Amino acid sequence: MDVGSEPIPTLDALGVVMEATSRADDALRLAATYLDSSLVDLLRIVGFDKDYVSAEGSYLYDTTGRAYLDFHTGEGFASLGHNHAGVGEVLQSVIGAGLVDGVQIHYSPLAGILAEELSQRLPSGLDAVFFTSTGAEAVDSAMKFARAATRRPRLISCESSFHGVTLGPLSLVGDDFFKEGFGPLVPGCDVVPFGDLGHLEDALRGKDVAAFIVEPIQGRAVTPAPPGYLEGAQEICRHYGTLFVLDEVQTGLGRTGKWFALEHGALEPDFVLIGKALSGGYMPVAAMVTRRQIYDRAVGTLERSYVHQSTFGRNRLSMAAGLATLRVIERDGLVEHAERMGAVLYDGLRDLQARYEIVKDVRGRGLMLGIELQAPSSRLARFSWRLMQTASAGLFPQLIVIPLHRDHGVITMAAGKNDVIKLLPPLTLSEDEAGSFLEALDSVLADCQEDKGKNWAVMREIALGTLSRKSRAS
């Protein structure tokens, strides 16, 4: 799609697409009225209140025709880029075929084929699949299956981890910010420091822990597991009879330059949790993959065959989207491409780190990268940094995120209540697009190198406004 071109809507008899297209500039008002008004307010404060009308590949387009290079992809769900033609064609064909979709009383061949293809890309023995609609539901399923299979009550996760915001997975999240106001949570869930095998072993020593759930790269601040940590954790789990669960909802399906991040080490987990990228950017779909003996111990009897189900978990469109995604990744060599493009970005970011004091660290694998910021040494910059931290933890990265979006048409996101910018570009990212991003970031960092630059002034104004709103609210 050329920048500025108008999307041509496909008309439907009920007028749904036409109305959505014609009311594109009403999207934020509708969201503020009927959905989440606080999120709309946040988008307006940081200048992300754009009316996007179409998307293709690595770009989103607003009502003026301006293109935005997407380095966030909805936390990685659009890993093939937006509106991938191959996946879309498969979905249209499935609808046209009139296939059966009674997921509660019928097993579609699509579900079995997708389960087979996932299992073939995982370590031997991971051959029992339960499909869900979201990554959080996959995590929740693993929590249930681990308890049922082991007859143990406790579950262990890591500090700073993130596994979802529904009540079960939220109980595992290692960041109290997400838990505030939602307690009491699921009992028996505890956290240990990420990367610390000693604390993990202490937690498992009582042999009452059903599962240890861990991300190979923590998504909150893009923190890779230290060398040897996951292998050591697996060994400790085996010793104490605790099931070893890898949450690959964000790292799976090529994101780190391997089909799964577990391939970076000698890992044979008891569960692998998959989501986001499995959607192909279209359909809600995720999966819990485990060993047959674990599955059968949890629910694998006639009496228990219906105790754990998901209404839309293996619906035909989600299964087709998952299959199409795997085949596009395979056909187009996107795992290897992600590794190459990740190296291009990583090398470029390390070069910027060497030139700009504000860049404290660059880390990650493949096309999952984090840029950690720090306050420059000048007195005014450090004052401004403290002002932002006082106003809201996690505000400081907007110093870079806002002008990237406003001045250069690049979409990135702050990773959370920290000083990290997370990059999750599509696996289809081209070298030219990677170069465009690095040039834009270079320009923004150059402005921020001077503590009197326009971006510092904008952020001081936002920080003061945030403090004023807090004062009025109290």
Image: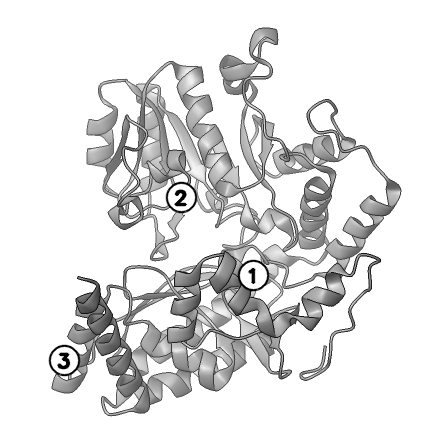
Residue type for callout 1? Ala
Which of discs 2 and 1 lies nearer the camera? The answer is 2
Q: Nearer the viewer, residue 381 or 345?
A: 381
Q: Residues within 10 Å of mark 1 (few under 14, many from 20)?
A: many
> In the rendering, which numbered label is found on residue 383?
3
Which label number is shown at residue 338?
A: 1
Of badges 3 and 2, the one in the foreground is 2
At x 24%, y 66%, the residue is 392
Taking 323 as reference, is 359 above or below it?
below
Q: If you read the primary sequence from the N terminus, does the residue marked by circle 3 or circle 2 appear first?
A: 2
Q: Nearer the viewer, residue 236 or 448?
A: 448
Residue closest to the far left: 379
The quadrant of the image that shows the N terminus is bottom right
Identify the residue shown where x is 31% and y is 48%: 178
Amino acid marked by disc 3: Phe
Examine the rendered structure and indicate whether residue 237 appears above or below residue 80.
Answer: above
- In this rendering, which labeled residue sits more in front, label 3 or label 1? 3
Q: Is residue 150 above or below residue 91?
A: above
Q: Disc 3 versus disc 1: distance between alpha carbons?
A: 39 Å
Q: Which residue is mark 2?
A: 165
Discs 3, 1 touching: Cβ within 8 Å = no
Q: Is residue 153 left or right of residue 142?
A: left
How far apart are the two marked residues, 3 and 2, measured between alpha carbons? 34 Å
Counting residues from the N terminus, which is met first, the one under dot 2 or under dot 1?
2
Describe the element under mark 2 as helix, strand or loop: loop
Residue name at image x 65 percent, y 70 percent: 23
Q: Position of residue 186 (x, y in %)?
A: 32, 29
**Does label 3 or label 1 sit earlier along the sequence?**
1
- Secondary structure at badge 3 equals helix
Q: Residues within 10 Å of mark 3 (few under 14, many from 20)?
A: some
